[in-house]
Amino acid sequence: MKIKKCAKKLLLKNGTILDPLAGKEYKGDVLVENGKIAAVGKISTKDANVIDCSGLIITHGFCDLHVHFREPGREDKETLETGSRAALAGGFTRVCAMPNTDPPIDSPESVRFIVEKADACPIHIHPIGAATKGQLGKELTEMSGMAEEGSVAFSDDGLPIMDGGVMRRVLEYGGMLDLPIINHAEDVCLRNDGVMNEGRTSTRLGLPGNPVEAEGVMVHRDLELAKLTGAKLHVPHISTATAVKNVSEMKKQYENISAEVTPHHLFFIDDDLKEFDTNLKVAPPIRSQSDRKELIKGFKNGTIDCIATDHAPHTIEDKEATFDMAAFGMIGLESCLGATLNVLVEEESLDLMTVIKALTVNPREIMGFETDIFAEKTPAELTIFDPKESWEFSKNDIFSKSCNSPFVGRKLTGRVKYTIVKNQIALI
Amino acid sequence: MSLHHRHLLGLEGYPAEDIQTIIDTAFTFREVLDRPIKKVPSLQGKTIVNLFFENSTRTRISFELAQKRLSADTVNFSASTSSLKKGESFKDTVQNIEAMKIDACVMRHPTPGAPLRLTEYVDAVVINAGDGTHEHPTQAILDMTSLQKKFGYLKGLKVGIIGDISHSRVALSNIYGLITMGAEVTLCGPATLIPPHIEELGVKINYNLDDVIEWADALNVLRIQMERMGISLFPSVREYRSLFGITTERLANHKKEIIIMHPGPINRGVEIESAVADGDQAIILDQVLNGVASRMAILYLLLGGKAES
């Protein structure tokens, strides 16, 4: 991957413009001048630097609501800088970073640390602040002060807020600020020491199972509390049929609800763990084929709003451990588009527009970010990709500091070619 | 006479003909063990390391004895799990041992899947001596050897497995092995100690021990670990004993004389009454001797030993 400054006048020529906000797809060009959108349509200009985009899609830069960039504390796994490179490789121009760092991002000062460091990074990184001090699930953080410093949402991600009373207060207080609350929805008592989906495969492998109900009951509780308090609730990495059903039911009664799904929950099933591949050890766990099918259905019918990677880098030592000791999580930025298109477009014949909306307009709407990316004078945030290219994901395609990806060696469909953001262009 | 797989990691998907080959070979070695001089030169010059990442007395001694009876050179490695929290040290440890030119590794480890990982790190033949709550294939083979010796057949045999199924590698390997060999298996124990979806492996569940005794030809009684009480998996020893304890009184209510097995170590007075463990129906000590013979058979077949004269 090469990252360089955009030419003063950059013409993206002969591409297919996919405008997920307008819901339109047409042949055309995009002119970027001084890093800003100058024109979209049929453009003829002489003195521009031209990139031939024939056969490629030009669309909004992808936006990921769920990444772990590990800074501060575990810079051996990822930094804001290396995470940004992984994002660029995956076509992401904007990400929201979870606060479960060491120490956690649970004060206005620590939010400011991320914002200042992110400023020098090649993509836009928004911190999500912790909902409770030290992510301990007990005392509220200074959400207002954190919001002023740039926190765009609140979450104790990785650690579920088990106490329903605390969750209610988090929603009430966060609701006052009109920012989304995100709870890692797993009942930790039901999850117990589960390291994979509870089912036939966990029993066969002798591994402690995490039942689908651990997610189902927690999502149900959070939805009820969101309705009670009137807060915005965003359900992260939804993994079960029950949770999809719960979200779908609640959306009929209450509108401030959104949900995300990860590419890995769409792509893999628990049977894939039969070789004890620790890269497939994630939280919530990879579920059964029937859950996976319901996630796809939930995505198709709009119950699930967006795709988020839950990019979670870990060192080789952390993953080369025996299954019980291995860390939870996988990286996902670089493989996101290929994995998602492979499942939803190639296998499920869903239209490209719906999928791209879930990577662009929808996540931006949830967070209240600018969604009219093709409007004139908007700082260019563009992703250019080949929707058809079939390729095998390899270690060479990873730009994260960590390489814990079960997608290595897998066939993916659709590949990012260029990512434009902050007046720079990344050639992938 | 050879087996389809280079390693013995578990009995899931293990071919019936290979299980039969091991059992038949075990019978041959049982005869050797009854001789005045119990040693054969089959594995002379082979080096086997016993890697025990978890405490074990009987399995380790059984393997060691089997190796010595076959004239192999053996090295023992034991590590407390506390000093091996990280997988990297697991990898380092086994690679160090591999560097010493080993022909086979017999490994016990607290984590499911650890023997499979081991096959990626070493060239040696790997034999699983128990991986957490996953499999314990050599125990299941010795159990089947004992059953075949007693009954003369496995196909159609009715076996009840009693007790803590959830935390038992012995149960899982026995289920895979017995089902493959055409036996019928019923599990019996507290619902909190029976893993979900286990019926999908082809077994039945019955919470009524008397029904199971009436039905079965043999019972494999598993050890109840007292520490399970602390996490509320069953309320008390008294209640466990009254629902699932094997007592002479209970057995006397049934006309048919069934066989009682136990992988050891026994909690006398909990899952099994002393009088039953020491009684005529129990073949517990016979299992121990068959254990040595079965492990000799496995080592011999996997390490390509010279045919015994």
Image (spheres, rainbow, N blue to C red):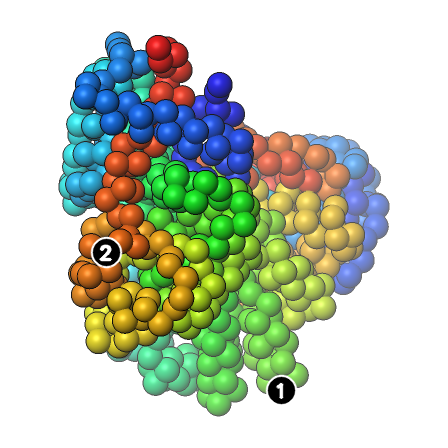
* Residue in front for this viewpoint, A322 or A428: A322
Q: Please tell me how crowded label 2 is: few (under 14), some (14-19), or many (20+) other residues with Cα within 10 Å.
A: few
Task: Name the residue: 27% across, 12% down.
Answer: B41
Q: Which mark is residue B279?
A: 2
Residue A11 showing in the rendered view: no
Whether discs 1 and 2 lie on one chain: the answer is no
Q: Which mark is residue A253?
A: 1
Task: Name the residue: 68% across, 49% down.
Answer: A343
Residue A74 position (above or below residue A401): below
* Residue in front for this viewpoint, A155 or A63: A155
Mark 1 or 2, which is nearer the eye? 2
From the viewer's perspective, is A181 left or right of B281?
right
The chain holding disc 2 is B
Task: Name the residue: 44% across, 59% down.
Answer: B216
Where residue A362 sits in the image (x, y, percent)?
Answer: 63, 64
Where residue A342 sits in the image (x, y, percent)?
Answer: 68, 45
The amino acid type found where label 1 is placed reads: Gln
Residue A185 position (above or below residue B68): below
Q: CA distance from mark 1 to mark 2?
A: 67 Å
Q: Which mark is residue A231?
A: none
Where residue A72 sits in the image (x, y, percent)?
Answer: 29, 51
* Residue in front for this viewpoint, A377 or B215: B215
Where residue A119 sits in the image (x, y, percent)?
Answer: 41, 51
* Residue in front for this viewpoint, A64 or B158: B158
Residue A295 showing in the rendered view: yes
Q: Please tell me how crowded label 1 is: few (under 14), some (14-19), or many (20+) other residues with Cα within 10 Å.
A: few
Q: Are marks 1 and 2 in contact (CB under 8 Å)?
A: no
Q: Quadrant of the C terminus of chain B?
A: top left
Task: Name the residue: 33% across, 61% down.
Answer: B164
The amino acid type found where label 2 is placed reads: Gly
